[in-house]
């Protein structure tokens, strides 16, 4: 899932894992997992059977979410206590999970402040994988990491996708990472998915004007700052068009019909939410 900051990517991820902060809530729509709408099941059922067992999430800024007063082992234990009770702590599974992210079991006795940023990020990923979920939601997993650690995290996600056959929902605004990992791309703007298509189709022939702008603004070798197209958001027009296309205030192709909410249109392998293709 790609889009600029504030487009709703993290909110959508949090909605899937049911961790929206109040007053945020799901008001409509479905989230289907194995043909079951998981918005319809109770909180207890979701916590017991879905969260971390079938869907896990690496949250944005995850390396800062470890509790500083507990050891890494204690924080792993908490996952087992929450899902299986106090007597189900499986140290071997924890050690295997750490090995999967290239960390030695010796760090279990350490505290978060004793680990580097990259190590903490990998601990969080290991925690998300500990109960072997089908789906991993990774929200900006390489933010604030140096390029060498970023490469390690990207290679780890590649391994999980290829070798472990895990479905990964990657939330990012970095098209470089997208090109490394994605099969499909959902482009979000102002809380809506405006285009959904295969990676190759998005790069070779983006359909939505917003997707075209994102692709054209992705830095390329040899480009200069003056070659990057600048856009500005007309907040007044956007606020007045809550019932129409939310990109109207920035769109170079905007016309009168765009003041109505555009449909989601099937085009080639994917979908686009734009009157240009109606």
Image (cartoon, rainbow, N blue to C red):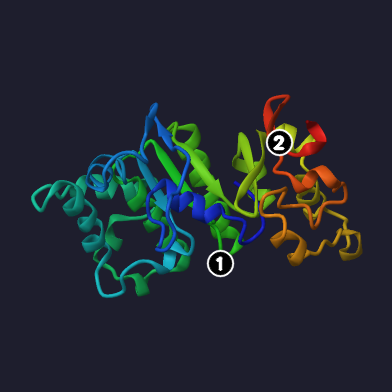
Q: Residue furthest left?
A: 87
Near-viewer residue (255 or 37): 255
Whichever of callouts 1 and 2 sits on the residue coming sooner in the sequence is: 1
- Which residue corresponds to mark 2? 272
Q: Circle 2: is it few (<14), some (14-19), or many (20+) Cα within 10 Å?
A: many
Residue 220: x percent and y percent? 81, 53
Local secondary structure at mark 1: loop
Near-viewer residue (248 or 211): 248
Using the image, tell me which numbered label, if any, was put on residue 144: 1
Residue 92 visible (yes or no): yes
Q: Is residue 135 above or below residue 110?
A: above
Q: Residue at x 42, y 69 (%)?
A: 64
Residue 206 visible (yes or no): no
Q: Residue furthest top?
A: 268
| Label tally | 2
Residue 272: image quadrant is: top right
Q: Residue at x 77, y 48 (%)?
A: 259
Residue 7: x percent and y percent? 62, 56
Residue 37: x percent and y percent? 38, 34
Residue 41: x percent and y percent? 29, 39
């Amino acid at each position: 899932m790609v889009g600029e900051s504030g487009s709703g990517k993290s909110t959508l991820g949090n909605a899937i894992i049911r961790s929206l902060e109040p007053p945020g809530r799901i008001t409509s729509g479905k989230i289907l997992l194995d043909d079951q709408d998981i918005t319809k099941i109770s909180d207890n059922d979701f916590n017991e059977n879905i969260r971390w067992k079938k869907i896990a999430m690496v949250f944005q800024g995850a390396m800062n979410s470890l509790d500083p007063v507990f050891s890494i082992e204690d924080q792993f234990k908490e996952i087992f206590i929450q899902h299986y009770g106090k007597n189900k702590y499986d140290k071997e599974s924890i050690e295997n999970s750490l090995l999967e992210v290239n960390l030695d079991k010796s760090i279990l006795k350490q505290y978060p402040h004793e680990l580097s940023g990259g190590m903490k990020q990998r601990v969080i990923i290991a925690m998300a994988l500990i109960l072997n979920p089908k789906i991993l939601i990774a929200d900006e997993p390489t933010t604030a990491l140096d390029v060498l650690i970023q490469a390690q995290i990207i290679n780890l996600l590649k391994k999980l996708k290829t070798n472990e056959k895990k479905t990964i929902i990657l939330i990012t605004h970095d098209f470089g990472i997208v090109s490394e990992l994605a099969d499909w791309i959902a482009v979000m703007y102002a809380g809506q998915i405006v285009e959904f298509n295969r990676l190759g189709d998005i790069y070779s022939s983006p359909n939505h004007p917003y997707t075209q702008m994102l692709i054209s603004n992705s830095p390329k070798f040899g480009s200069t700052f003056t070659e990057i197209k600048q856009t500005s958001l007309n907040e007044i027009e956007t606020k007045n068009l809550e019932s129409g296309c939310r990109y109207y205030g920035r769109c170079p192709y905007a016309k009168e019909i765009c003041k109505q909410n555009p449909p989601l249109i099937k085009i080639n392998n994917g979908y686009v939410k734009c009157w240009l293709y109606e």
